Image (cartoon, rainbow, N blue to C red):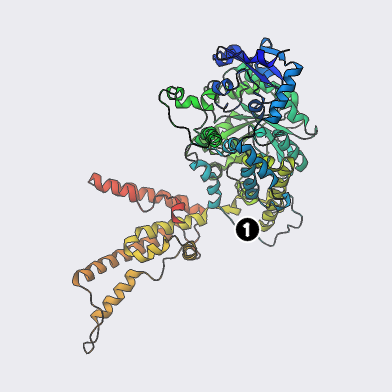
């Protein structure tokens, strides 16, 4: 047994011991970077280790339990640290002294804030939406936890667009269809789910609640949905699966590290424990640049000091590459960057009979390759916007897949030997989507376009952080209510009744055509354009009601009428209005341009296929865009100067646009 004084002597990078849960461990080799010696299983690394070696040195010779427990499963040391480095327990007096120190220590300002926020939480009955749950969670989470859960790559553009993308899809409800008995249940890889929603893999749930992933597992079991457990879960895989009834299916998400032996050990452990499928993540070879997560440490430090830290010349951080400051460097050190369709998929098939889903598909081409590789499913995901900035939102990838390769939804025909289920030839492809889901209607849009189910990550982390297992149950019930209500509104009595024709982007396209029209005629109707782009949102919404029609009150047309009136004024009465000759010429020239623009708009409508109400049929849109592209190419070919060429490239009237600029 060790005393605190004995442990305290080992407080240097070359001789470092730490105390975790009243036991002593020698982590010197870890600090020296001898990872191959230190780790028996290098695949089991916590995601984004907070600070690398530096955070361990902060606890050198001391108790590190408070920093260690929230991000590590209970069996992490047993799996990763050689037995010779497990030095044994503390003495009885040391255990008592450590407990007293913990009880009497001064709490940080952030801890006091969290305690108060937990006391002030509203009753669970007042949580009516996923947004309500997130609002409570952000208040009760520590600065570190909130930053980790909400952080995204670079400027958060991708994660923002993940949510915005759903607003570009609208329903085509059907009526006079029996929906009194509405059933939202579905199956995932042959396992029944009460609603077409699953808990996506998400790491470090213990940062938000001591029971972490177990809260999500129990809540999923209570409500009948399926959870995908992360390789980097903060609870052990055994603890998670032991927390739910044997009848509750759990899937396992795998980060494939370059050490095949270690990766195989991880897969076989999951299969032995009873996990029912493997979701192979393929979009995290390196971690995204999550600056909010990195800054959280400084925020906490400044909060405790009461003033911001200032730069000191010669600081050790200045000598470190920026990449090393994040968990990305540590994570990528073991990532298998040579995964391929030809090598990795057959290798996984050779070591497990579990169903295999590829997580992180972000384009139609890779979805096709996945089908050709014979996997059981694909999960369309950009990792919640946490990886590559400007990745396409999953719902947009799903839409493109539906439009370009609808056959993929029927091609994943797989037989699995030695299991209790199999996929017949006519089985619907298991295509999943994650990213940006806030409402049950978002789920329904994805299902209309062909998704089997939709995954949520952050909402479950927020729910379990705010209210534990009860919070998880609550958001599933909210989604269940919204999904069933939406299905009835759509005229669908079951998920099989949700069809592609029930969701489309026609309204978005109608707005696109109108946008090009007003931008092209901006100089002709300055007051009109100013009104359309006025920040007064109510006025904008009212004008938007007439989105497919030009406004009847053009200022240019009014001015032309006034000029006509002045020119035909009775000689007996003096005219109260006069226009200069140049003003009249310029107005008439602009009027001619206006007429040409209106004529072009009519041609565009005909080509795209505007109906009487302004809708753009989907089948006409792609043809029209191809025609517009051809017109642009012909125009560019006729130009003789680089200046004209650049002008057309920058302002071609039928190029796509960001609709957010028009709101």
Which residue is label 1 attached to? 173
| Residue 491 placement (x, y as % from top left) | 68, 57
| Residue 9 placement (x, y as % from top left) | 61, 13
Question: Measured along the vertical axis of the image, is residue 477 above or below residue 259?
Answer: below
* Picture quarter with the N terminus: top right
Q: Is residue 483 left or right of residue 558?
A: right
Q: Is residue 339 visible?
A: no
Q: From this viewpoint, which residue is outermost toward the left?
A: 581
Residue at x-position 28% and y-position 65%: 590
Question: Measured along the vertical axis of the image, is residue 397 above or below residue 169?
Answer: above
Q: Nearer the viewer, residue 479 or 409?
A: 479
Q: From this viewpoint, which residue is outermost toward the bottom?
A: 572
* Badge 1 density bin: few <14, some 14–19, many ≥20, Cα 10 Å: some
Q: From this viewpoint, which residue is outermost toward the top?
A: 84
Q: Is residue 300 left or right of residue 84?
A: left
Q: Residue 118, located in which quarter of the rendered image?
A: top right
| Residue 45 placement (x, y as % from top left) | 61, 23
Q: Is residue 559 visible?
A: yes
User: Callout 1: helix, strand or loop?
Assistant: loop
How many marks on residues? 1
Q: Nearer the viewer, residue 60 or 454?
A: 60
| Residue 454 placement (x, y as % from top left) | 64, 42
Q: Is residue 412 left or right of residue 88?
A: left
Question: Measured along the vertical axis of the image, is residue 229 above or below residue 90?
Answer: below
Q: Residue 408, located in which quarter of the rendered image?
A: top right
């Amino acid at each position: 047994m060790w005393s605190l004084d004995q442990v305290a002597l080992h407080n240097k990078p070359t001789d470092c011991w730490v105390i975790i849960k009243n036991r002593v461990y020698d982590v010197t080799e870890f600090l020296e970077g001898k990872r191959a010696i230190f780790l028996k299983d290098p695949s089991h690394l916590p995601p984004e280790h907070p600070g690398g070696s530096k955070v361990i040195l902060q606890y050198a010779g001391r108790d590190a339990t408070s920093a260690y427990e929230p991000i590590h499963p209970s069996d992490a040391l047993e799996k990763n640290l050689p037995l010779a480095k497990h030095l044994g327990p503390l003495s009885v007096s040391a255990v008592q002294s450590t407990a007293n120190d913990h009880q009497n220590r001064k709490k940080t300002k952030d801890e006091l804030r969290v305690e108060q926020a937990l006391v002030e939480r509203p009753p669970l009955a007042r949580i009516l939406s996923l947004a309500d749950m997130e609002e409570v969670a952000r208040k009760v989470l520590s600065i570190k936890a909130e930053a980790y859960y909400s952080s995204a790559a670079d400027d958060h553009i991708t994660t923002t667009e993940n949510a915005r993308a759903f607003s570009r899809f609208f329903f085509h409800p059907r009526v006079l269809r029996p929906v009194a008995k509405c059933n939202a249940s579905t199956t995932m890889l042959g396992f029944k789910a009460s609603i077409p929603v699953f808990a996506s893999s998400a790491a470090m749930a213990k940062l938000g609640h001591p029971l972490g992933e177990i809260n999500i597992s129990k809540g999923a079991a209570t409500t009948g949905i399926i959870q995908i457990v992360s390789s980097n879960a903060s609870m052990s895989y055994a603890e998670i699966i032991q927390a739910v009834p044997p009848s509750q299916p759990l899937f396992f998400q795998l980060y494939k590290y370059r050490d095949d032996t270690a990766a195989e050990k991880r897969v076989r452990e999951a299969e032995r424990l009873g996990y029912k499928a493997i979701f192979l993540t393929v979009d995290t070879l390196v971690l995204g640049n999550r600056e909010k997560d990195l800054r959280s440490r400084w925020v906490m430090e400044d909060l405790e000091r009461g003033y911001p830290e200032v730069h000191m010349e010669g600081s050790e951080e200045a000598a470190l590459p920026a990449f090393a400051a994040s968990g990305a460097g540590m994570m990528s050190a073991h990532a298998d960057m040579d995964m391929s369709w030809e090598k990795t998929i057959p290798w996984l098939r050779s070591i497990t009979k579990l169903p295999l889903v590829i997580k992180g598909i972000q384009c139609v081409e890779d979805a096709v390759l996945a089908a050709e590789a014979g996997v059981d499913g694909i999960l369309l995901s950009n990792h919640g916007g946490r990886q590559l900035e400007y990745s396409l939102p999953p719902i947009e990838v799903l839409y493109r897949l539906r439009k370009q390769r609808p056959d993929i939804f029927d091609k994943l025909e797989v037989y699995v030997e030695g299991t209790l289920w199999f996929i017949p030839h006519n089985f619907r492809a298991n295509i999943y989507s994650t990213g940006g889901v806030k409402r049950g209607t978002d789920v329904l849009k994805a299902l209309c376009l062909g998704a089997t189910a939709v995954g949520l990550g952050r909402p479950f982390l927020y729910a379990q952080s705010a209210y534990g297992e009860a919070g998880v149950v609550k958001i599933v019930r909210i989604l269940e209510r919204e999904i069933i209500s939406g299905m009835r509104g759509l005229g669908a009595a079951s998920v099989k009744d949700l069809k592609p024709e029930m969701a489309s982007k026609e309204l978005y396209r109608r707005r696109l055509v109108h946008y090009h029209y007003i931008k092209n005629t901006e100089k002709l109707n300055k007051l009109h354009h100013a009104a359309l782009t006025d920040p007064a949102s109510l006025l904008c919404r009212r004008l938007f009601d007439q989105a497919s029609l030009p406004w009847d009150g053009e200022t240019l047309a009014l001015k032309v009428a006034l000029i006509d009136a002045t020119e035909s004024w009775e000689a007996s009465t003096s005219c109260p209005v006069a226009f200069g000759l140049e003003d009249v010429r310029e107005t008439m020239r602009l009027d001619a341009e206006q007429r040409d623009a209106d004529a072009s708009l009519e041609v565009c409508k005909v080509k795209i296929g505007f109906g009487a109400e302004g809708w753009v049929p989907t089948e006409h849109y792609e043809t029209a865009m191809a025609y517009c592209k051809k017109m642009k190419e012909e125009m560019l070919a006729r130009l003789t100067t680089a200046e004209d060429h650049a002008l057309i490239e920058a302002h071609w009237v039928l190029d796509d646009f960001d609709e957010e600029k028009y709101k």
